Amino acid sequence: MISKETIEEILARTDIEPLISSYVNLKRAGDTYKGLCPFHSEKSPSFTVYPRTSSFYCFGCGIGGDAVTFIKQMEHLDYPDALEFLAKRAGITIVDNDKPLREEKKFNRDRMFKMNADAANFFHRCLMANTDAAKSALSYFTEKRGLSLSTIRHFGLGYAPDTFDSLLNYMRSKGYSYDELVAGFLCGKSEKGKYYDAFRNRVMFPIIDVSGNVIAFGGRAMDNETKPKYKNSSDTPVYKKTRHVYALNFARHTCSEQLILCEGYMDVIALHAAGFTNAIATLGTAITSDQARLMSRYTKKVVICYDSDEAGQKAANKALKVIGDTGLDVGVIVVPGSKDPDEYIKTFGKEKFAEVLEGAKIEFEYKMDNILAKFDLNLPQDRVKVVAMLENEISRVYSEAEREVYVQLVSKATGIEAKSIKADVERIIQKNKRSYKATEGLKARQSAAGYADKVNPDFAKAPAIARHEETILALLLLFAEHRKTVFEKAILTEDNFFTEFNKKVFNYVKDAYTGGDVFPNLNETFTPEEIGRITKIKNERMALANNGDDVLFESINALKSSMEKKNAEGATTFDQLAELIKKMRSDSSGS
Ligand SMILES: [Zn+2]
């Protein structure tokens, strides 16, 4: 276990605002900072950072907590690894007595990175070897794909020989166990229990994360007969294909203005070789919102450059939505007269590609052109339809200035006066607002009936009592003095609590106190949604700070008397009767 002192030191040396700023674009708003939530897709910021309590809370998805909670969620780490991550960042060496134990249970990340790096080196040496097979693999890159040796070295490209055990033998000689090799998707195991190389007779592309670790591989067949054409690592303890992006480790240095998103790694390499070092690709999957949010940490705009065939354009349409939902600007280019950007650059040169890139259509233009292509503007009924569809699109745009630009574009394309388009859009926005309010009202009623509150479903059964509980918990969490008063004099026990969730939090804080924890650490026990709720409870009551013991005692008295009143109502409700019967049954069966 990592010692309490170390945990406190890590938290003390971690300023939450700069930490979160390295992932989320934050804007100051009074005492707090606001930004787009990295944990759910949104277009207007509801993610809030509170430097005063070193916490964050998202009003959209309910996730919140401290620096550790944030890193756990953001880097997909477990609790001890999140602490280690923050310790490294703060320059603290931590002694974790349980570490060998923990490492036994799961695969050691650093060792897996080392294993992958060793495999990448092996593949690269196989490519450069003086054999006929190696020479033909190398000529696939140099002649068929026109790559220079320096590009090949830059991307660490390699070759997996056409055998069942070359990599296996090499890695075994380096001391890696069969289990590790299988877990890292470098080897497979047959039904008869025989181990074999996962990649055979393929050119190899190491996949590297933004910190420079080799995390996985993509293997491509060199002819058109071999199936599958692409074989990529499945998910491993250090690699999730829906979360990583190819070549972002290079692109991150030159992509602050824009990223070029391609379909495959050959496109990316061709673009980098031609000087477009801000090109990336997803890895054999349609783009996910995790990947889009990863991109949004490094850039303002993504230009999608997928294959020009129908499948590619369909995928581009999907990507447009996923990326747009993260709040990034999105553009689309279609390379005219070529299959993909690789072929385009080879045929027309990089200057021409730069021109295509320059003329990237913004998201709205691309959508508009797609709609326009489906209708005949000379037919009045088509014209009405087109304008209505485009007005709907515009009404979804958040910024007024942007809407203005699109109104002009539509006016120009359809010949309808900008003034009337604008009036229509305004009407749609007002209508949407009204229906939004109506659904919000419904949500509020549902949550009052206890539906939507997943964290504390009892809240709605007795909101007044639950609020007293929350105030008490907030004060206990905020002030060590209050913890001392309440726990040492035992003026409050779990029986005073009505809602199960608040009771759980109370017991947790109490156990932490009696166990000698100065600062109760929630990250071990509670989910991010639960920690979010606790953070919200705390932050909402920060203003109670200067009131000494008064508020605490008032709240405790109020809680006790409302609970007495509630209990005095007697076991008359159906719920309580059912509970009573259940208890009687379990008592009699237990004896
Ligand atoms: Zn959120």
Image (cartoon, rainbow, N blue to C red):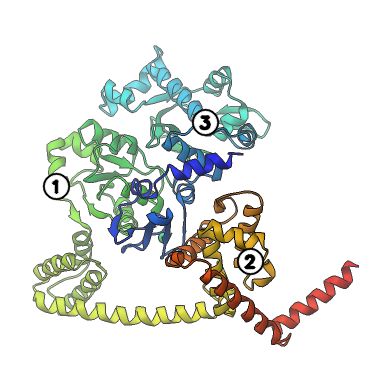
Residue sitting at x 39%, y 11%: 130
SS under mark 1 = helix
Residue sitting at x 18%, y 78%: 384
Crowding near the residue tagged with mark 2, few <14, some 14–19, many ≥20 C-alpha atoms within 10 Å: some
On the rendered image, what quadrant is the N terminus found in?
Answer: top right
- Which amino acid type is marked by label 1? Glu
Q: Are marks 1 and 3 in contact (CB under 8 Å)?
A: no
Number of on-image labels:
3
Front-lying residue, 22 or 178:
22
Nearest to N terminus: mark 1 or mark 3:
3
Tell me: 496 left or right of 475: right
Q: CA distance from mark 2 to mark 1?
A: 59 Å
Q: Are marks 2 and 1 in contact (CB under 8 Å)?
A: no
Residue sitting at x 37%, y 16%: 128
Judging by the rendered image, the residue that carries numbered circle 3 is 112
In the picture, the disc for residue 503 is 2
Quadrant of ligand 1: it is bottom left
In which image quadrant can residue 37 be found? bottom left
- Compared to residue 501, the image places residue 558 above or below, namely below
Look at the image and tell me whether residue 202 can be seen: yes
- Compared to residue 510, the image places residue 112 above or below, namely above
- Which amino acid type is marked by label 3? Met
